[in-house]
Image (cartoon, coloured by chain):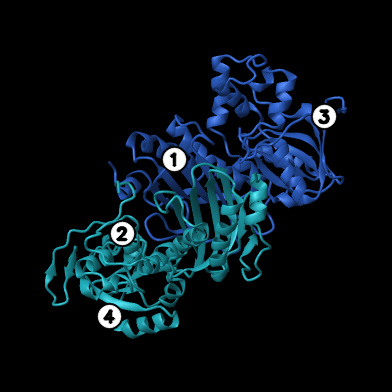
Chain colours: A blue, B cyan
Amino acid sequence: MLSEFDLISRYFTRPARSYIAQIALGVGDDCALLTPAAGTQIAISTDMLVEGRHFFPDAEPFTLGHKCLAVNLSDLAAMGARPLAFTLALALPAAREEWLGPFSAGLLALADSHHCELIGGDTTKGPLNICITVFGETLPGQALRRDAAQAGDDIWVSGTLGDARLALAGYRNELTDQLVMDAEQHALAATRMHQPTPRVALGIALRGIARAAIDISDGLIGDLGHILARSGVGATLAVDSLPAGPVLTQQTQAIRRHFTLAGGDDYELCFTAPADRRDAVFAAGQAAATAVTRIGSIDAASGLRLHDADGAVLNLQLTSFDHFRST
Amino acid sequence: MLSEFDLISRYFTRPARSYIAQIALGVGDDCALLTPAAGTQIAISTDMLVEGRHFFPDAEPFTLGHKCLAVNLSDLAAMGARPLAFTLALALPAAREEWLGPFSAGLLALADSHHCELIGGDTTKGPLNICITVFGETLPGQALRRDAAQAGDDIWVSGTLGDARLALAGYRNELTDQLVMDAEQHALAATRMHQPTPRVALGIALRGIARAAIDISDGLIGDLGHILARSGVGATLAVDSLPAGPVLTQQTQAIRRHFTLAGGDDYELCFTAPADRRDAVFAAGQAAATAVTRIGSIDAASGLRLHDADGAVLNLQLTSFDHFRST
C-alpha cells in the first residue's frame, strides 16, 4: 500500500515547468506561491466531481483525469482567462497504483497541453471525490462576465451540443423506443461525455469582442438563464439553428431540440456579442479553430422565448440540471 | 428541499466586503477575480475534510465550519501569508437547512475575523466532503518555506501541543487504564480538537525573523520531518520542554511525551530562527498574543534526536499520521 507521501511524489510531483514564470513555489510546502505579472488579474474556479454523480463508479481513470481538469479549464475559458496552474484534492477509498497511474497521466496530459501546472493539493482516504481549483490570468476589464449582456447582442455557441447527453441516454437505456443509435455511434457520442474539450483558445480570442459568456455544463437554457438573470435581460433562441453534435444530428427533431437545449456536460461556450461584431466573432472562432454558431439574440424584455425555423413560438417543457434534485 | 442555487444564495452569498480591495469579482460567475497588489505574491493552499476521517459523522456543524477554514488558514499562517479569500466545494448527502445554517455561520464567522472572503465554489450531492482552497498575500522572498532551515537555528513551537490528540483518545476510549480525565477536562481538550486557532498573526509577525516554518497537523515529529527533509538538515528536540496543553499537562510523562511529539490536529506553528534572533521571536509572539517556546535546534547531521530533561537520549517508538494507513 502506498503512503500518502509516496503517492504524491510518485504521481503528482514533477520538476517545475519552465514555461510558467509566475509559479514561485509548487507542490510540497504549506502553500504554493504565484507571482502574478504586474497589472494582471487572477481568475479562480473550483469544481468537485463525485463518483456516482458526475462519473460512473467504473469510469476509465485516464479519461476521468482529463475530464476533471477539463471542466475547470472550461470555467477559465468562459472568463477569457489563460490557464496558469491548479490544485488537486483527492479523496480515495484506497491508494491503488493501477488507478493512480492512468488518472494522473490523463490529468497531466491535458494540463501540459494548456501549460497549466499542478502546484499543490491534498490527498485523503474517503469515498472517491476529486476537487480541482484552477487559476488563470486575465487583464482588468477584459474578463467575460455573466452580467455584461446587453439588449440587441447576438447569442452564440461554440462547437456542438447534445452528444454528451445522448451518450448518457444510451448508458441509461432512456428513450429506447425513439433513439436509433448503434454501438459505434454511442462510442462517438461517449467521447464527448468523457473527454470534453475546454474552449480555452476561443475564450482568449473573444477578449474585447464578446460581452457576456458562460460555459454550458448543466444545459444551454439553464446556463444561458444565468447570463439573463445577472444581466437583467431576456432572450430569443432560434431552436432549430442550435448546432447538434454529429451523432445527435441523426436523431428525431424532438430529441435534437431536447438535448441541444437541455442536455448537459457540453462544456461549450455560450456568449453574447454586439451585432456589429459578427465578423470579429467568426475571425476569433477561426483563430481558435473552433466553430461558432449564432443562435439568437438578447432582448430587453425578460424571459426566454424559443422559436422554430419559421419563427413560430415553441412551447417546450424543459428543465435544467440541479445537483440536489433526484435524477 | 433547497435547490443548488437557493442553497448558494441563502447561505454562501453576501455583499462583497469592502475591506478587501483585491477582490474584483466574487461568488456567482464562472470564476472569481483577484487583483493582487503590485509586487505581491499569492499563497495558495487546499485542504479536503472527509466525514468519518477528519470529523465524526455527528460533528456539530458550527464548529465543523470553523475547523474546515481554520486548517486552511493555518497553512497560510505557516507561510507568513495574510488571508485574502477562499473557495468552498461542498458535497452533501442532502441540502438540510438545519445543517447548512450553523455550518455556514461557523465558517463565515472565522472568515470575517480574518477578513477572508468567500469568493466562489461548488456544491453537489454526495458523501459529505468539504474542500477549501485559500488565498493569501505575501511579499516575494518573505514567505516562510519548509526548505529554509539552517544548522544552528533554534526550533520553536507556538501555543501548546497534544490536547486535541488527548480529546481523541477520550472519544476512542484509548488508554483508559492510564488516562485520568473527567468530563470537564475532556470538554476543554475537545475545544482544541474542534476549534483550532490558526496562528495567522504570528506567521505574519515572523516574516523576516523565522527561516523555515510548517503548521503541525499530523504531529510534531512528522511535520518537523518535512522541514528537515526539504532543508537537508537534522534536529535535536528537548522532549520535556515541549509545551503540553492545559489538560495534557495533568497526564503521565509517557502520555505527555507521546501526544506532544506525535499527536495531530494541533494547528500550531513549528518554525526555525537564527539563535541570535531569540528576542525578536519573543517580541513577535508578544505582538501576536501567542506563546512561543524554544524546543530544540537544527543540526547539520541528518536524523532526529530526542533528548530528555537531563540531555540523555530518548528512544521512543512514534509514528506520524498517514492518511492511507488504517487507524
Q: Residue at x 27, y 80 (%)?
A: B275
Corner quadrant of residue A127: top left
Q: Position of residue A314 (x, y in %)?
A: 83, 28
Q: Which label sits on residue B173?
A: none
Secondary structure under the numbered disc 4 in the rendered image: helix
Taking B75 as reference, is A192 above or below it? Answer: above
Viewer-proximal residue among B244 and B12: B244
Left or right, A128 with reference to A226? left
Taking B65 as reference, is A96 above or below it? Answer: above
- In contact (CB < 8 Å): disc 4 and disc 1: no
Circle 4 packing at 10 Å, graded few (<14), some (14-19), many (20+), is few
Secondary structure under the numbered disc 1 in the rendered image: loop
Q: Which residue is mark 3?
A: A315
Q: Which residue is mark 1?
A: A128
Q: Disc 2 versus disc 1: distance between alpha carbons?
A: 28 Å
Q: Have a look at marks 1 and 3 and say if they share a chain.
A: yes
Secondary structure under the numbered disc 3 in the rendered image: loop
Q: Which residue is mark 4?
A: B275
Which is closer to the viewer, label 4 or label 1? 1
Circle 3 packing at 10 Å, graded few (<14), some (14-19), many (20+), is few
Q: Position of residue B165 (x, y in %)?
A: 32, 62
Three-letter code for the amino acid on which mark 2 is drawn:
Ala
Circle 2 packing at 10 Å, graded few (<14), some (14-19), many (20+), is some
Viewer-proximal residue among B126 and A156: B126
Q: Which residue is mark 2?
A: B169
Which is closer to the viewer, label 2 or label 4? 2
